[in-house]
Amino acid sequence: MNRDFIQLKQLDGELKWSQKKTDYGITVSTKELVFHKPHLNYHLKFDDVISITPCELKERRVTLTSKREENVEYVRTTAYQPSYRVYVRKVTIHNHSGQYVTGPMQFVLPLTEPLLKVVGQYSGLNQF
């Protein structure tokens, strides 16, 4: 685990899943998903999640870019991990300077099947 992760001070809801790797981490509660990067946490409230869809990436990399007024966060994954695009209305960002809320963002995250089931169960988003 990376020492540069910012420790969670508060988490809405009851903790259901927490996983940290070298480059990123994911924590899921009954009310939100927190995406951790070194020096940065993104709090995605399930009420603000618009959709979660499968996504195939040609390149595996970590970047933060802006695309037509929407921020896109890509996470490094391996070729065998399924990636999902998560669209949200707003995100609370927590860094060393404090917390602030942004507008719409999309994240491309590696979500394993067990993790995706937990997110689906508490977000209210179901696969059809």
Image (cartoon, rainbow, N blue to C red):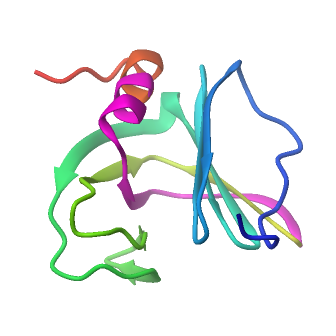
Residue at 18% across, 24% down: 127
Residue 20 percent location from the top left of the image: 63, 54
Residue at image coords 54%, 49%: 90
Relative to the observer, which residue lies in front, 67 or 3?
3
Q: Is residue 43 above or below residue 24?
A: above
* Residue range of the region highlighted in magenta in the rendering: 97-118
In the image: residue 109, left or right of residue 56: right
> Which quadrant: the C terminus?
top left
**Residue 39, relative to residue 44: is it above or below?**
below
Q: Which quadrant holds residue 7?
A: bottom right
Q: Residue at x 27, y 57 (%)?
A: 81
The x, y position of residue 120, in whole percent, is: 36, 24
Q: Is residue 111 magenta?
A: yes
* Placement of the N terminus among the 4 image quadrants: bottom right
Residue 6 % position (x, y): 82, 61
Residue sitting farthest toward the left: 128
The relative height of residue 58 versus residue 7 in the rendered view (above or below) is below
Q: Residue at x 28, y 51 (%)?
A: 84
